[in-house]
Image: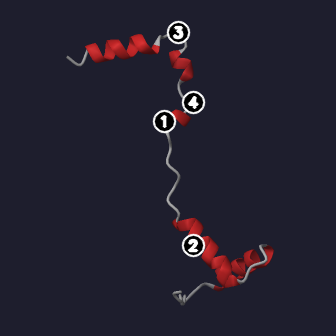
Amino acid sequence: MAILNVKNLPDGLYRKLKVRAKRERRSVAQAVVVLLEQALEPPPAVLILELRGLGKELWRDIDAGSHVAKERAGWR
């Protein structure tokens, strides 16, 4: 396992880290590992199927299938 030394860590930041570690019943080193894991996780993918309701009011009286067909016909 790798070892990481951090130099010039501001005192205020270290105090906050100690408080968090104590609150979560972790060592300071464990708290740093957890924070780094969280910070470096890739953001979850946003699926278009999960975007329910966006612009819903714009489509209230429009048939989506007819609209798509009309748009595609305009591509020619």
Residue ID for mark 3: 61
Q: Gap in Å between the C-alphas at discs 3 and 1?
A: 22 Å
Residue ID for mark 1: 48
Residue 24 relative to residue 13: left or right: right
**Residue depicted at x 32% and y 16%:** 71
The amino acid marked with disc number 2 is: Leu
Residue 18 relative to residue 10: left or right: right
Label whose residue precedes the other's in the sequence (2 or 4): 2
Which numbered circle lies on residue 6? none
Label whose residue precedes the other's in the sequence (1 or 2): 2
Q: At which x and y percent is residue 73? A: 27, 13
| 47 shown above or below 61 | below
Secondary structure category for the residue under label 2: helix
The amino acid marked with disc number 1 is: Ile
Looking at the rendered image, the disc whose residue lies closer to the viewer, 4 or 3, is 4
Which numbered circle lies on residue 36? 2
Q: Gap in Å between the C-alphas at discs 4 and 3?
A: 17 Å
Is there CB contact under 8 Å for labels 4 and 1?
no
Looking at the rendered image, the disc whose residue lies closer to the viewer, 3 or 1, is 1
Q: Gap in Å between the C-alphas at discs 2 and 4?
A: 32 Å
